[in-house]
Amino acid sequence: MAPVARGLAGSHRVVEPFQRGSGGERLTVARHVADLHEVINFYAGRCRPALLGASWGAMLALAYAATHPSSTGRWSSSGVEPSIWLRVPSWKEPLPNE
């Protein structure tokens, strides 16, 4: 996504949040969505930012948009693996070890 971000930087404000380390905490999709919401609130305020994501980032953007539809503008994704949603009973739970 870095080349896309660099390409957009000339006409858009680009923010790339980095995921937290677990520090022993079990990380869930819901925790990552909450972290992303904090970043968006800090940088975008009341704006509805466009979200871009690839692979895991695409799934995170989708989960974020589903959780915070009023805070999400346009979004684009690539490389989403839909079968993961079939293996996880609830996206709020930790992903199973495979």
Image (cartoon, rainbow, N blue to C red):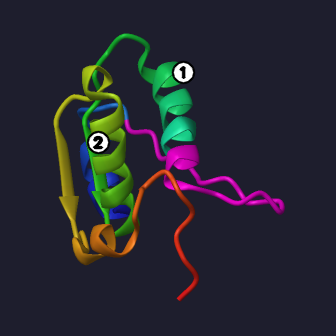
Residue at label 1? Answer: 42
What's the amino acid at mark 1? Phe
Which image quadrant: the N terminus? bottom left
Displayed quadrant of residue 12: top left
Q: Residue furthest front?
A: 89
Residue 19 painted magenta: yes
What's the amino acid at mark 2? Leu
Q: Residue furthest top?
A: 46
In this rendering, does residue 17 appear at all? no
Magenta span of residues: 14-32
| Residue 94, horizontal then vertical, whole percent | 57, 63
| Residue 79, horizontal then vertical, whole percent | 23, 72
CB of mark 1 within 8 Å of CB of mark 2?
no
The prevailing secondary structure element of the residues shown in magenta is loop
Q: Secondary structure at mark 1?
A: helix
Q: Residue at x 40, y 64 (%)?
A: 89
Q: Is residue 87 rendered to the left or right of residue 75?
A: right
Say which mark, if any, is on residue 71.
Answer: none
| Residue 93, horizontal then vertical, whole percent | 53, 57
Displayed quadrant of residue 96: bottom right
**Depth order, front residue of 23/40:** 23
Q: Residue at x 25, y 74 (%)?
A: 81
Q: Is residue 35 rendered to the left or right of residue 9?
A: right
Say which mark, if any, is on residue 51.
Answer: 2
Q: Residue at x 28, y 22 (%)?
A: 48
Q: Residue at x 41, y 20 (%)?
A: 44
Q: Is residue 31 above or below residue 80?
A: above
